[in-house]
Amino acid sequence: MTYATVMVSLALDQLNEARLQVAGELAERFEAAIVGVAAAQFAPPLYFTDGAEAQALIDEGEASIKRRLAGLEAQFRAAVKNRGGHAEWRSAMDYPARFVTAQARCADIVVSGGQSPAFSDAFSLASPKDLVMQTGRPLLVVPDRANWLDLRSVLVAWKDTPEARRAVAGALPMLHKAKDVTIVEIPERGDDRSAVMAGVSDVAAWLGRHGITATARVLEAAGNETPAARLEKVAGDTGAGLIVAGAYGHSRFRELILGGVTQYLVTQTVRSVLLSH
């Protein structure tokens, strides 16, 4: 398995340099095509007018968005011009999540930026939480401070769910490039530790049959610490440059209201994260 097409989602009023760097590097490593995508929709002011004045405001707003999308295209082409291989740009006046979701049909993996804990604007930003739910592709979330795709150590945050299984399968090309792979599970209270260890060992054995050597670990139950805090400690201890995880093991409503591991993964600013739903 490899990545033949890498898609990178750019956004207005965001720092796009890190995601462009990582997406370009990923395309280069796998000799893949790279497709840049961006979209934005004009958001009328809260207090609007009507008639000719309203149309003039709409025309001016849409023209501004088109100019800014053209600026993103120029940034994309400048970033990939020396990468070699096929490069393509797609943009539209549309809601970003909807547009990127539609374009993802041509990609093996989608690269996006992370998300601040603050409310995001659906008119100008494709939230990674929306993309991972809707694209049907592995999503590589790159924090703004990243300047390369560090695959020296990869941490697989395992939970025996369909989401985690799809994430590990989607990460196989990168796991082949990694020097060290650690699979870790944090049991729930009352879980049979030996059964949990057997499951993690199964995943390590499966990776081994794909030519990937991985270490299996089961932590103690979280206790008073949140699973996200435990995961952050393990990632720090292993020097992980990439975390692979399933997204939304519980209902998305619960994740949005209470936070959780997925919320932590898309808002942390230290390392890249590959998510799948």
Image: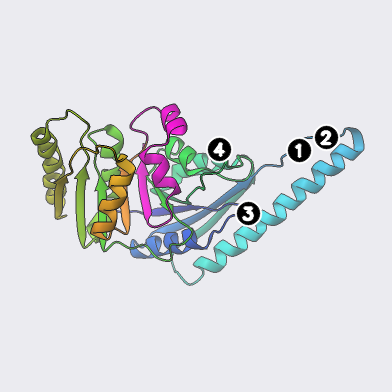
Q: Is residue 256 magenta?
A: yes
230 relative to 147 in the view: left or right: left
Q: Are marks 4 and 3 in contact (CB under 8 Å)?
A: no
Residue type (three-letter) at the residue carrying disc 2: Phe
Q: Which type of secondary structure does the marked residue at label 2 adopt?
A: loop
Per the model, the C-alpha gap separating discs 4 and 2 is 25 Å
Task: Name the residue furthest right.
Answer: 52
Instruction: First in sequence, mark 4 or 3: give its number.
Output: 3
Q: Position of residue 251 (x, y in %)?
A: 39, 27
Q: Residue at x 52, y 67 (%)?
A: 79
Q: In the rendered image, which residue does mark 2 sit on?
A: 48
Residue type (three-letter) at the residue carrying disc 1: Pro
Residue 98's disc is 4
Per the model, the C-alpha gap separating discs 3 and 2 is 23 Å
Instruction: First in sequence, mark 1 or 3: give its number.
Output: 3
Residue type (three-letter) at the residue carrying disc 3: Asp
Disc 1 residue crowd, few under 14, some 14–19, many 20+, Cα 10 Å: few
Q: Residue at x 55, y 62 (%)?
A: 76
Q: In the rendered image, which residue does mark 3 sit on?
A: 13
Relative height, residue 220 to residue 35 (above, below): above
Residue type (three-letter) at the residue carrying disc 4: Arg
Disc 4 residue crowd, few under 14, some 14–19, many 20+, Cα 10 Å: some
Q: In the rendered image, which residue does mark 1 sit on?
A: 44
Residue 172 seen by the camera: no
| Mark toward the viewer: 4 or 3 | 3
Per the model, the C-alpha gap separating discs 4 and 3 is 18 Å
Asked which quadrant contains residue 173, the reply is bottom left
